[in-house]
Amino acid sequence: MNGKYNIAIGFLTMGLFMAYGFLLIYLRDFAPGKEEWINSYSFGKHFESRLAHVHGNLFAFLNIVIGYLLLHFHTKLKNIKAISWLALIGLLMPVGILAEIYLKAPPIFVLIGAISMTISVMWLGIAFLKMKQINDYTN
C-alpha cells in the first residue's frame, strides 16, 4: 500500500456517494411522499442519509489526497502502509451510516471508520512535521 489504492478507491467511493446524492434529490423532489421527506430534514433517515452523503464524499476526497501525498512523498515519510490502511478503513464511517439506515446495523462501523480516518489524518500530519526536507520532492 503506497497510496495507489487510496486514490482508486477514493474516486470510486466518491462516484458512488455522488450517485447516492441523486437518490437524495429524487427523494426530496420527485418521490411519492416527498413532503414527509422534506419535513424530516433535521432528524431521522433524512438527516442520517445526508450525513452519509457528505461524509462519504469528504472521506473519499481525503483518501485521494492522502493517496497522492503518500505516492509523492513515499521515500521521505514513514509508516505509509499504516496511514494508507487507516484512511481506507475510514470509509467504514459513511458506509456504516448507510448500513445503520438501511440494514439496521450497529454504529460500530461508524465509530471504527471515524477513529481510523482521524488517526490517519493526524499521523500523516505528524509524519510531515517530522520530515527533514521537502524541497527536493516538490517538483
Image (spheres, grey):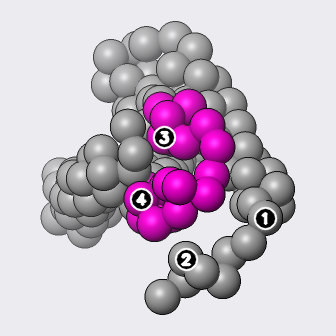
Q: Mark 4 = which residue?
A: 71
First of labels 4, 1 by sequence position: 4
x and y percent of residue 134 in the render? 68, 75
The residue that disc 2 covers is 137
Q: Nearer the viewer, mark 4 or mark 3?
A: 4
Q: Amino acid at mark 3?
A: Ser
Nearer the camera: disc 2 or disc 3: 2
Label 3 environment density (alpha carbons within 10 Å; few <14, some 14–19, many ≥20) = many
Kind of residue at disc 1: Lys
Q: Quadrant of the N terminus?
A: top left
Q: Earlier in the sequence, mark 4 or mark 3?
A: 4
For the point 42% across and 59% down, the residue is: 71
Mark 4 touching mark 1, by CB under 8 A?
no
* Residue that badge 3 annotates: 84
Residue 34 lies within the magenta run? no
The three-letter code of the residue at mark 2 reads: Tyr
